[in-house]
Image (cartoon, rainbow, N blue to C red):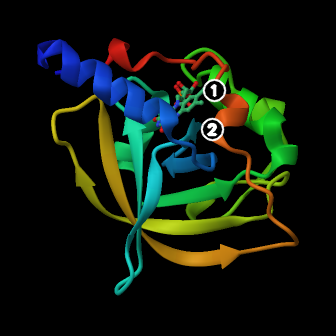
Amino acid sequence: VIDELPTDTAQGFDRVASLLDYPMIVVTTVAGPVVGGCLVGFHTQSSINPPRYAVWLSKANHTFRVALQADVFALHFLDEANKDLAEIFGTTTNDQVDKFDGCRWHPGPEGVPLLDGCATRSVMQKCGLVDDGGDHVCVVLEPVTCEVSGPYDPLMFSHVRDLDAGHDPNEA
Ligand SMILES: Cc1cc2nc3c(=O)[nH]c(=O)nc-3n(C[C@H](O)[C@H](O)[C@H](O)COP(=O)(O)O)c2cc1C
């Protein structure tokens, strides 16, 4: 726990983390009749052969609870033009509103929501879950389908860092 680290280490980690920038994605998922989705900054390719992609979901999020029961996920790689999607999926929670009412989408494989406004996306299958005791859990995914359409100018963390998240990870 960061509060238990020596002060120098905790401050140093905050400083290093604040230097980083990364593309933002929206992760959607489905379990039975329940759909979920949230803005995610913590994600990366995690294996080449076999191909694997990892996303980290906050234990406080509605999306995390859906993800525990889910098999299929859709990763939407947001473009600079997708700031509206970042706001909907990053600042509101399905615990309080239906964020899918606020955007255009259609059901993909197994009903996973595919956001019409973001054409650079990949549908993936869950193949692992790693809980190291932190406030986020790593979901390891295997790609099933990938779509790339036109140029991709990524919406970066630095473009949306001022948004207030719908759930604080400390709620977990
Ligand atoms: C800039 C930014 C980055 C975020 N990164 C993540 C992340 O990597 N993982 C995550 O689970 N939530 C992340 N969030 C928080 C969720 O997107 C947010 O709490 C959302 O409202 C949760 O919705 P839900 O409860 O419907 O799942 C981020 C939010 C913002 C504003």
Position of residue 162 relative to residue 138, above or below, is above
| Residue 2 visible in rendering | no
Q: Is mark 2 within 8 Å of ligand 1?
A: yes
Which residue shows up at 59% across the image and 57% down it?
A: 75
Spatial CA span between label 2 and label 1:
6 Å
Q: Sort mark 2 into few (<14), some (14-19) or many (20+) by Cα contacts within 10 Å.
A: some
Q: SS of the residue at dot 1?
A: loop
Q: Which residue is mark 2?
A: 157
Which residue shows up at 39% across the image and 45% down it?
A: 56
Q: Quadrant of the C terminus?
A: top left
- Estimate the x, y position of residue 118 in percent, counting from the top left: 79, 55
Position of residue 86 relative to residue 140, above or below, is above
Amino acid type at circle 2 is: Phe
User: Going by the image, does 132 lie left or right of 162?
Assistant: left
Disc number for residue 161: 1
Amino acid type at circle 1 is: Arg
